[in-house]
Amino acid sequence: MKYIASICLLLLSFNSMAQKTYQKNYFDDGTLASEGWLLNTKKTDYWKFYHSNGNIQREGHFANGKETKYWRFYRANGTKESEGHYNNGQRQKWWLFYDSEEKINHKCQLKNNQKNGYCLMYKNEKLIAAVKFSEGKKIKTWTDYRSFRKENSLKDLQ
């Protein structure tokens, strides 16, 4: 019985140490700057950040104080700017970038916060070029599908 009581006391003490609270932060003028969950002192789960005019600046999830999963970014006027995946605080996989009319301007494969793979460039929602990057450095640009297809596998675009 003493053993069970000790385990219960230990579990209760761990539970009290891991406090999850909802936090709101404000700009000096009282406008909401950010809101989301904290686990102890680190951001966790879903958070929203705001421009000083009240529009959403960015939104997404945290794990252990670092961005994770899918995030969306917005301009001060409320239009979508970009969106994509984070892993352990680093931008990864495909990211979409939008022009001021919220049309896709380009989409790029990212790894560790830099272009690594392909970027597909668009104008008026039409594909106009493909660019290949390695660790943030441009390797080659293609402006027609035939030459791109000749030198690349479409599986690389996944």
Image: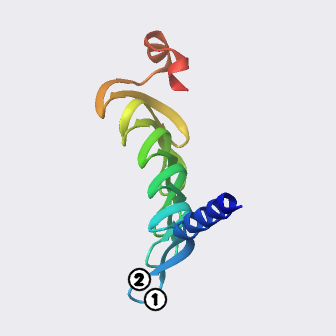
Q: Residue furthest bottom?
A: 29
- Residue 107 spot, x, y in % from top left: 48, 39
Numbered disc 1: secondary structure? loop
> Does 29 appear above or below 65?
below
Q: Residue furthest top?
A: 150
Which is more toward the observer, 124 or 32?
Answer: 32
Q: Residue placed at 51% from the left, 78% from the top?
A: 24
- Residue 148 spot, x, y in % from top left: 45, 17
> Does 127 appear above or below 152?
below
Which is more toward the observer, 141 or 134?
Answer: 134
Q: Residue placed at 55% from the left, 41% from the top?
A: 125
The reply, left or right, for residue 93 in relation to residue 7 is left
Label 2 crowd bin: few (<14), some (14–19), many (20+), radius 10 Å: few
Specify the quadrant of the image occupied by residue 140: top left
Q: Which mark is residue 30?
A: 1
Find out whether the residues at labels 1 and 2 contact each other: C-beta distance under 8 Å: yes
Q: Which mark is residue 27?
A: 2
Numbered disc 2: secondary structure? loop
- Residue 71 spot, x, y in % from top left: 53, 53
Label 1 crowd bin: few (<14), some (14–19), many (20+), radius 10 Å: few
Q: Amino acid type of disc 2? A: Phe
